[in-house]
């Protein structure tokens, strides 16, 4: 069997991530995006570890071509890899997994915001995370919405069309 060949399952996973990233390009509430869901989904459903990290990163970079790259992008991509790692290690979608991914993304990206734009003091760090809390609410809502949509949608397609279950 050729290990380089992309399976039907992998194609469906990629298709779900591509569809999700399109929603990032449309107007939306601040931080209500499928970013964390895409990373988690790739980690959960790609059996090939390389693809679990590279495909979500590539898809994210593709959308950033249209949205722009910024200094904070380094932290966003780092958080993205961490969320993919969480998906590869848990291998089973759950509320806990989504929450852990959201929290990890929040911690890493806001640490970057602190480094870039706040005084490098404990007060500056606390202020940065405190001011980010309203955005975290929208992130959580988006993460649960998009993760749920992708996971349940994938399970439906898997059962109905891929006969993998």
Image (tube, helix red, strand yellow):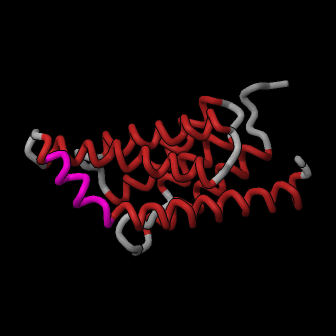
Q: Residue at image x 87%, y 57%?
A: 159
In the rendered image, which quarter contains the N terminus? top right
Q: Residue at image x 59%, y 49%?
A: 96
- Residue nearest the observer in this picture, 140 or 10: 140
Residue range corresponding to the magenta coloring: 124-134
- Say whether residue 76 is magenta: no
| Rendered location of residue 60, percent (x, y) | 46, 49
Q: Residue at image x 41%, y 73%?
A: 28
| Rendered location of residue 44, percent (x, y) | 66, 43
| Rendered location of residue 42, percent (x, y) | 61, 44
Classify residue 161 by image quadrant: bottom right
Left-right relation of 98 to 66: right
Classify residue 134 by image quadrant: bottom left
- Tally of marks: 0
| Rendered location of residue 124, percent (x, y) | 12, 47
Q: Main secondary structure of the magenta part?
A: helix
Left-right relation of 26 to 120: right
- Residue nearest the observer in this picture, 56 or 147: 147
């Amino acid at each position: 069997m050729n290990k380089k060949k992309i399976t039907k399952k992998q194609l469906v996973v990629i298709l779900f991530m591509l569809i999700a990233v399109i929603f990032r390009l449309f107007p939306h509430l601040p931080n209500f995006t499928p970013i964390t869901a895409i990373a988690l989904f790739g980690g959960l459903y790609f059996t090939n570890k390389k693809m679990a990290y590279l495909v979500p990163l590539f898809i994210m970079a593709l959308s950033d071509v249209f949205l722009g790259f910024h200094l904070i992008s380094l932290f966003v991509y780092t958080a993205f890899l961490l969320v993919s790692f969480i998906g590869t290690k848990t291998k089973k979608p759950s509320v806990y997994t989504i929450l852990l991914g959201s929290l990890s993304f929040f911690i890493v990206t806001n640490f970057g915001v602190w480094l870039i734009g706040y005084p490098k003091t404990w007060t500056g760090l606390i202020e940065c995370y405190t001011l980010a809390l309203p955005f975290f609410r929208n992130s959580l809502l988006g993460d649960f919405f998009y993760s749920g949509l992708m996971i349940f949608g994938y399970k439906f397609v898997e059962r109905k069309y891929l006969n993998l279950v």
